[in-house]
Structure formats: structure tokens, C-alpha cells
Image (cartoon, rainbow, N blue to C red):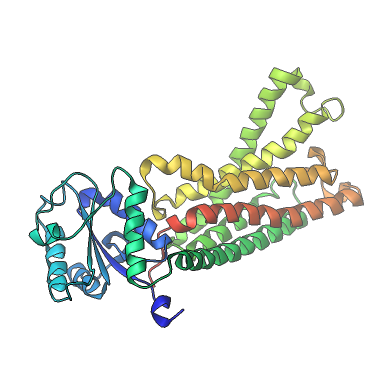
């Protein structure tokens, strides 16, 4: 790969404020392909002179994406000024050079004669077909091998995701050891420090991708704690419902003999829901740092937290495999047998490691391309 291919393609995205949702969608898609998009909503820093920065960004970009709609073509203001500046740059370029890429999001007629002379791409009725044509045009024009470019972008992001997941796994494994250390002191509050610490470190890992305030990082610790406790309580409610409907009288719910299957469900469902809601609350705190369409928020959050749900369930299965019961989990080491203490150590340390890795990997895999990136 030559030096030109190693450099990111820079693109300026021109749009009307009324079309900001479409602009964000394009920004997100392009960045995921390894293409550097300049979008004022994310690229302007506080205190910068926006007119100067916009003009500078247009002049430094290899391509100018003009997002055309029935609103933008009739609107007066800076959206037209940006387009005129791009047309002036295009006028100085060779006839064969591609610079302005018009993209229509509805049936509209461009107001500039020069834009009408350019072939545009429609992002309707098929968004995927339209945006793919734009991406391929850019990559082919830059002499990039499309399949190779996709692999490079994917591999680079995947390595980052793996590193962050491993760091998260180490955090949860260490927090499991902290939990074990505190086990003998106060069995009722011993889970609070590890969850709080893990939540904060999880937020710090996210901060390496997208800017998060210190306040949000602290709140993230509480978010994990509150979310996990809420999840455990939700799991208990589900178990209660299962017991009342299927098994029998309430007073036999915690019976260790006849109703062993309920105990197994308890050990799987409670940590699973704890992980699900713990991650969910954390993402709610940083929602403004994630690019998505408003109607997709529930779908994206649930998908991103599926890993925490699965990891929590696997943690519970590990407890069952090691012969740990619910009563063992809330027993102190000093009052437990050595075998139970050793198994608890394995479960909390190794279980915590895999819990952190699986949960983080799924979350970062889903959300990494959707995070607002830190400007370097």
C-alpha cells in the first residue's frame, strides 16, 4: 500500500439544518468506512470562528458532499454559501476531476445550474444502494482497492475493540478479587465498591473513543450499581412469577432440595438481568455521544447490551458448574468451607474476566462506529 492509501480521505458534508438526521447518518456511515467527514455538528470546537473553520475545511477536503433536499435547495443562508465556495473550487479544477458529489434525499430540483450538470445519486428509495455508490466512487477515484479498504478499516477497528474488551475483562476480574477480599467484612454491601469501580473504568474506556465529562464518568459508576441492582430485582420478580405460575406456593421458592431448578434459574437470570440493565443505564448517561436515529434507540441499546446479558448468564452457569448455590454467594468466607471459598474465588476472578470481555466486546462491536469520535 502506498503513502496515498495510508492517508484518510477528507470530505466536507454540506446540508441544511432541517436535514441534520440524514447528515449524521452519512457521517456515521463514512467514518465507519475509514473516511474522514467534516460535519460542523461534531467537528467544530468551542471557541473556534466557525466561518473561518468551515471555509478552511472546504478548501482542505478532497470531496464536497452536497446533501440536496426540497428544504435545502430553496433555503437561503450559509448552506448556499458553502455550495458556492465549492463550485468556485470546482471551476478551477480539470474537467475530469470529481469534487462535488450531489446526493438527493427526496424529489428535488437543484437550484444551481452547475449542480444540474453533475450526475447526482439518490438516497431514496434505497439508502444502502445510494450511499454505497458514493463510497465506491470515492474509493475507486482515490485508487483504493475497495475490498482491501474494507478489510483494513475493519481490522483496525477490531483490534481496538479487542484491546478495550481485554482491559474491561481485566477490570472485572480484578473487581471480582476485590469483591472476594471484602467478602469477609460486610456481606451486605460488599458488592457496591467493585461495581462502582468497574462502572467508572468502563466509562474511561468509552472516553478513549468519545468525549465524556468527569461528572458522567462518576455517574457511570453509580449507573452500573443502580442498573445491576435493578436487574437483579427484575430477575427475582421474573423468578417469583415463574414459581407462582409453574412451581407452586411462594414459601417454597428458596427451598434447596425439591426446587433445585428454581435455584439454578435464579443463579442465571439474576446476573443476566443485572448485566443487561447495568450496561443499559450506563449507555443512557452517554446517549448524546452516540449517533443514531431517535426511533432506533431502544433497538441499538438492547443489541449493544446483549453481551452483558449473555455474560451474566454464563457467570451464573459457572457458579452452578462450580457447585455454588445462592446461599453460598451470600455466605462469608470465614463461615464457609475451603472448597466453597476456593470456588467462589475462581468464579469471581475468572468469571469476572469473561463477563467483562464478552459484555464489552458486544457493546463496543455494536457502538464503536456510532460513537462520536474524539477530534485529534
Left-right relation of 188 to 159:
right
Residue drawn at 32 percent across, 61 percent down: 42
Q: Position of residue 222 (x, y in %)?
A: 55, 50
Compared with residue 130, is residue 135 higher up or lower down, i.e. above or below?
below
* Position in image of residue 275 (x %, y %): 62, 45
Q: Is residue 184 visible?
A: no
Name the spot of residue 365 as percent of width and height, x first.
53, 55
Quadrant of the rendered image containing residue 210: bottom left
Q: Quick one: quadrant of the C terminus?
A: bottom left
Q: What residue is drawn where x is 49% and y is 49%?
A: 283
Q: Residue at x 33, y 66 (%)?
A: 138
Left or right: where 155 falls relative to 334: left
Position of 226 compared to 54: left or right? right
Q: Nearer the viewer, residue 217 or 348?
A: 348
Q: Locate residue 231, reporting x and y percent.
A: 61, 39
Residue 374 vertical position relative to residue 269 in the rendered view, above or below: below
Give the residue drawn at x 37%, y 60%: 30
Going by the picture, which residue comes out furthest to the bottom?
Answer: 3
Amino acid at each position: 500500500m502506498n503513502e496515498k492509501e495510508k492517508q484518510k480521505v477528507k470530505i466536507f458534508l454540506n446540508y441544511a439544518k432541517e436535514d441534520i438526521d440524514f447528515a449524521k447518518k452519512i457521517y456515521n456511515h463514512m467514518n465507519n468506512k475509514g473516511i474522514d467527514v467534516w460535519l460542523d455538528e461534531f467537528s467544530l470546537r468551542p471557541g473556534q470562528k466557525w466561518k473561518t473553520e468551515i471555509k478552511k475545511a472546504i478548501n482542505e477536503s478532497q470531496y464536497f458532499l452536497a446533501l440536496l433536499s426540497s428544504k435545502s435547495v430553496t433555503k437561503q443562508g450559509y448552506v448556499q454559501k458553502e455550495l458556492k465556495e465549492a463550485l468556485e473550487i470546482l471551476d478551477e479544477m480539470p474537467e475530469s476531476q470529481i469534487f462535488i458529489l450531489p446526493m438527493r434525499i427526496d424529489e428535488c430540483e437543484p437550484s444551481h445550474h452547475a449542480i444540474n450538470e453533475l450526475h447526482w445519486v439518490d438516497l431514496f428509495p434505497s439508502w444502502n444502494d445510494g450511499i454505497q455508490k458514493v463510497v465506491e466512487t470515492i474509493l475507486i477515484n482515490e485508487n483504493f482497492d475497495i475490498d482491501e479498504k474494507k478489510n483494513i478499516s475493519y481490522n483496525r477497528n477490531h483490534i481496538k475493540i479487542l484491546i478495550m474488551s481485554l482491559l474491561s475483562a481485566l477490570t472485572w476480574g480484578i473487581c471480582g478479587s476485590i469483591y472476594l477480599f471484602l467478602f469477609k467484612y460486610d456481606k451486605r454491601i460488599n458488592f457496591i465498591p467493585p461495581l462502582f469501580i468497574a462502572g467508572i473504568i468502563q466509562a474511561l474506556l468509552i472516553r478513549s473513543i468519545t468525549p465524556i465529562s468527569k461528572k458522567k464518568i462518576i455517574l457511570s459508576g453509580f449507573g452500573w450499581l443502580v442498573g445491576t441492582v435493578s436487574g437483579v430485582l427484575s430477575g427475582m420478580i421474573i423468578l417469583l412469577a415463574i414459581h407462582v405460575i409453574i412451581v407452586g406456593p411462594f414459601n417454597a421458592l428458596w427451598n434447596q432440595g425439591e426446587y433445585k431448578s428454581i435455584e439454578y434459574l435464579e443463579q442465571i437470570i439474576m446476573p443476566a438481568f443485572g448485566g443487561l440493565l447495568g450496561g443499559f443505564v450506563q449507555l443512557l448517561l452517554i446517549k448524546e455521544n452516540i449517533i443514531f436515529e431517535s426511533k432506533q434507540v431502544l433497538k441499538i441499546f438492547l443489541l449493544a447490551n446483549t453481551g452483558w446479558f449473555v455474560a451474566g448468564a454464563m457467570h451464573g452457569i459457572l457458579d452452578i458448574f462450580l457447585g455454588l448455590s445462592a446461599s453460598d454467594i451470600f455466605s462469608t468466607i470465614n463461615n464457609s468451607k475451603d472448597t466453597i471459598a476456593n470456588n467462589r474465588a475462581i468464579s469471581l476472578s475468572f468469571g469476572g474476566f469473561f463477563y467483562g470481555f464478552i459484555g464489552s466486546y458486544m457493546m463496543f462491536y455494536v457502538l464503536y462506529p456510532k460513537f462520536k469520535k474524539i477530534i485529534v
